[in-house]
Image: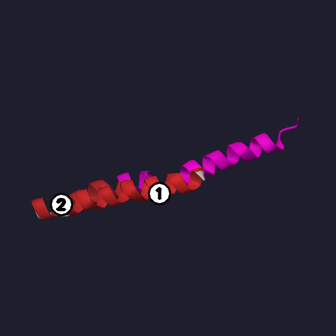
Amino acid sequence: MRSAWVCTRTDVLGNLAVLLAAVGVFGTGTGWPDVIVSPIMAGLQGAWIVLRQSRHELRIAASPA
């Protein structure tokens, strides 16, 4: 359930970033807004959050009771 929420949130934020970059490219006539937004989008990857939580849960399950 959390994975679905994280991925949906990441998709929405990524789409907004792309729209802002498109407006920036249109307004400035240069590709710099794309260059600025692309590293931000790379950092928005929800998979990192899901993987981190999964590792945590696996550690808890593997620890001796």
The CA distance from mark 2 to mark 1 is 23 Å
Residue at 47% across, 57% down: 8
Is residue 60 part of the magenta span, yes or no? yes
Q: Which residue is mark 1?
A: 8
Q: Within 10 Å of the Cα at label 2, are there few (<14), some (14-19), or many (20+) other Cα atoms?
A: few
Identify which residue is drawn at 83% across, 39% down.
63
SS for dot 2 = helix
Tell me which amino acid carries mark 1. Thr
Q: Residue at x 69, y 47 (%)?
A: 55
- Check residue 59 for magenta coloring: yes
Residue in front for this viewpoint, 36 or 64: 64
In this view, the residue in front, 42 or 7, is 7
Asked if labels 1 and 2 touch by Cβ distance under 8 angstroms, the answer is no
Q: Which residue is mark 2?
A: 23
User: Left or right: 7 with respect to 18?
Assistant: right
Hey, what amino acid is under mark 2? Answer: Val
| Secondary structure beneath label 1 | helix
Rendered view: 47 above or below 61: below
Q: Is residue 11 left or right of residue 6?
A: left
The boundaries of the magenta stretch are 40-65
Q: Is residue 3 left or right of residue 57?
A: left
| Quadrant of the frame with the C terminus | top right
